[in-house]
Image (cartoon, coloured by chain):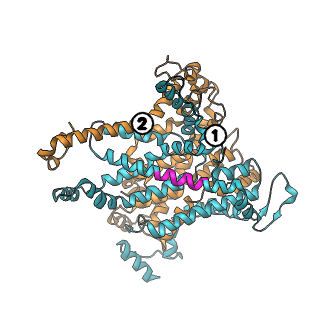
């Protein structure tokens, strides 16, 4: 069955049987490893649909009566505030990142400033700066300015956290835009903003989408800054989940349900745009 | 100035601007303008706080003892390097990062090679593979702590009971082996990330050359060593670099799974604890500076000497 999929040049008659067996073995291995990585997630889904008493059993039951007790408990505790805060911070900061990164990427690729490579490396080096190394002054500033527990302050810091990655990615996508297109627009008298909006943006839309996806995921996932900077009003979904850290699995089904619900936006975005995810993760550095 | 513009134009292939605008702004500044908002934003929000950390790291500042505040020179650094917990955090960070990145790289490469072949259900397997990466990190950490590692009703001990009977050993995974427990959970999450980058590399291979080599009698192993690996080099470097950046900073898993117990605190968790719980701002800052210095030295050394990924540029 696998042989039929191979190009003719690989189909050498004397080895066909051996290659076929080997191919089948590799296929089974791939499936086995894939399942191995998937099983913890699958287990999470199964446990989340159990009653709390069925969830905490040893040995595990593969199939238990279906129950939405975990989800009912999770939503009964009114998690909408944290979910909404996460959505606000992630969407707003992603928009802000793209708005700032797009012109910057232009200045680093199409009409590069002097020493543009040094600027790029500076931006990359800010990603090597662990957030913990800046967290105390950020906390003190927030406390001093009265912006502690304010979702917009968090949004600003998420923007600065993702901006370097977005610039790196967009730069490599912009480098692909044919120079002639930009020249033509400029001869027609288009200014920078018009050129960016009407000439370059439509061409690099997939790159913008990839950058936005990555920024959204990293903002949605962030825990450390959110935990230090927010408490009750501006609490994000990951901070809300920390409430389950010490619950010792007393409410295992609820823990699984909560973890799944909070992951849904990222899971959905990631599954829908798998190819863009690859481009995004590699910061456009490799294609 | 004009030679610079001409040189830039020659490099980018763009013609020199036909006509300068009459504004007083020089060409160089007009070019910088689109970059400035982003650059200023990043500098103000990352470098200024770090400068603050640097200053506080030379101060005696514990918010429980506000009257003792003042500059103390290097004493915080001395304390970081002599404090058993801080030294242990440095070691844990190195062990955690190196082992997770190595495991992810080897597994990721293996799985990428398997997924590079066409086989029935390839798309399904790929989707199953990337799921761990798409789980919110703290959700993944909760899953491992409660649903998998829990000694009483976790899946692992449940499976042991299932297969070995009622007398099966029931280890307390997190309690008895905190570091391996962390390494397994973090590797589970980051292997798909490495795999995706490496798979992109494999799929960009020029297959006609590989075919030619095969016809010339090269074995699969020879093709892998002499053709696939050299082609993958920038992809391997990139996945190692990015993997390292993210794993060094890991906070969610350490916070959730072990809470730094029994010698499993890494630097980010140690800094968080020193700052948040102990309120010792000076010592936390010194530990933060040590983290940054370590990360920067290692990654810059790698980038400048071994790595080739960012050296060839398109423009």
- Secondary structure of the residue carrying tag 1 is helix
Residue interval drawn in magenta: B92-102
Instruction: Indicate the quadrant where residue A240 lies.
Output: top right
**Position in image of residue A281 (x %, y %):** 44, 52
Identify the residue under disc 1.
Answer: A239
Instruction: Determine the colour of chain B.
Output: cyan
Query: Do the residues marked 2 and 1 share a common chain?
Result: yes
How dense is the environment of label 1, judged by Cα within 10 Å: few (below 14), some, or many (20 and up)?
many
Please tell me which of labels 2 and 1 falls first in the chain.
2
2 or 1: mark nearer the eye? 2
Identify the residue under disc 2.
Answer: A36
Disc count in the image?
A: 2
**In the rendered structure, the residue with mark 2 lies on which chain?**
A
What's the distance in space between the residues labelled 2 and 1, CA to CA? 29 Å
- Secondary structure of the residue carrying tag 2 is helix
Majority SS type along the magenta span? helix
**Position in image of residue A228 (x %, y %):** 69, 47
Task: Give me the disc on residue B225.
Answer: none
Q: Nearer the viewer, residue B28 or B260?
A: B260
Residue B75 magenta: no
Residue at the location (85% across, 55% down)? B66
**Position in image of residue B258 (x %, y %):** 63, 41
Instruction: Determine the colour of chain A.
Output: orange
């Amino acid at each position: 069955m696998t042989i039929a999929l191979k190009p003719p040049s690989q189909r050498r008659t004397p080895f066909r049987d051996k290659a076929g067996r080997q191919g089948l073995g590799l296929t089974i291995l791939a499936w086995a490893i894939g399942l191995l990585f998937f099983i913890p997630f699958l287990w999470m889904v199964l446990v989340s649909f159990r009653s709390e008493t069925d969830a905490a059993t040893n040995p595990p039951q593969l199939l238990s009566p279906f129950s939405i007790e975990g989800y009912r408990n999770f939503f009964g505790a009114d998690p909408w505030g944290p979910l909404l805060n996460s959505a606000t911070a992630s969407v707003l900061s992603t928009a802000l990142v793209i708005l700032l990164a797009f012109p910057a990427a232009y200045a680093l690729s199409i009409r590069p400033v002097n020493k543009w490579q040094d600027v790029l490396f500076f931006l990359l080096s800010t990603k090597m700066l662990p957030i913990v190394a800046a967290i105390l002054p950020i906390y003190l500033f927030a406390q001093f300015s009265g912006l502690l527990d304010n979702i917009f302050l968090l949004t600003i810091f998420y923007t600065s956290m993702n901006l370097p990655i977005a610039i790196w990615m967009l730069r490599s996508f912009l480098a692909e835009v044919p120079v002639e297109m930009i020249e033509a627009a400029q001869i027609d008298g288009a200014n920078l903003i018009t050129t960016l909006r009407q000439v370059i943006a439509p061409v690099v839309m997939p790159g913008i989408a990839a950058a936005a996806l990555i920024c959204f995921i990293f903002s949605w996932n962030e825990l450390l800054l959110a935990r230090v900077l927010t408490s009750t009003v501006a609490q994000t979904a990951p901070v809300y989940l920390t409430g389950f850290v010490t619950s010792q699995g007393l409410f295992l089904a609820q823990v699984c349900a909560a973890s799944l619900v909070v992951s849904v936006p990222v899971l959905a975005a990631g599954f829908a745009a798998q190819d863009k995810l690859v481009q995004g993760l590699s910061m456009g550095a490799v294609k | 100035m004009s030679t610079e513009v001409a040189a830039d134009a020659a490099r980018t292939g763009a013609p020199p601007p036909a006509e300068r605008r009459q504004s007083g702004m020089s060409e160089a500044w007009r070019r910088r303008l689109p970059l400035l908002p982003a650059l200023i934003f990043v500098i103000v929000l990352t470098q200024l706080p770090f400068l603050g950390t640097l200053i506080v790291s030379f101060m005696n500042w514990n918010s429980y003892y506000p009257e003792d505040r003042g500059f103390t020179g290097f004493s915080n650094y001395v304390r970081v390097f002599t404090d058993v917990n801080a030294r242990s955090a440095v070691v844990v960070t190195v062990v955690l990062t190196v082992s997770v990145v190595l495991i992810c790289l080897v597994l990721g490469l293996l799985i990428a090679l398997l997924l590079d072949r066409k086989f029935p259900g390839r798309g399904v397997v790929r989707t199953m593979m990337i799921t761990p990466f798409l789980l919110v990190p703290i959700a993944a950490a909760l899953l491992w702590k409660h649903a998998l590692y829990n000694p009483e009703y976790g899946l692992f001990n449940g499976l042991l009971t299932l297969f070995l009977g009622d007398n099966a050993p029931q280890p307390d995974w997190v309690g008895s082996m905190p570091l391996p427990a962390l390494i397994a959970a973090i590797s589970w999450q980051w292997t798909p990330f490495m795999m995706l980058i490496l798979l992109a590399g494999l799929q960009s291979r020029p297959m006609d050359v590989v075919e030619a080599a095969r016809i010339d009698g090269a074995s699969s192993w020879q093709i892998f060593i002499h053709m696939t690996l050299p082609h993958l080099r920038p992809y391997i470097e990139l996945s190692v670099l990015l993997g390292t950046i993210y794993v060094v900073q890991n906070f969610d898993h350490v916070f959730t799974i072990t809470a730094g117990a029994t010698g499993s605190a890494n630097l980010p968790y140690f800094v968080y604890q020193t700052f948040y719980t102990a309120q010792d701002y000076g010592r936390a800052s010194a530990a933060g500076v040590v983290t940054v210095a370590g990360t920067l030295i290692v990654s810059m050394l790698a980038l400048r000497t071994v790595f080739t990924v960012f050296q060839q540029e398109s423009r």
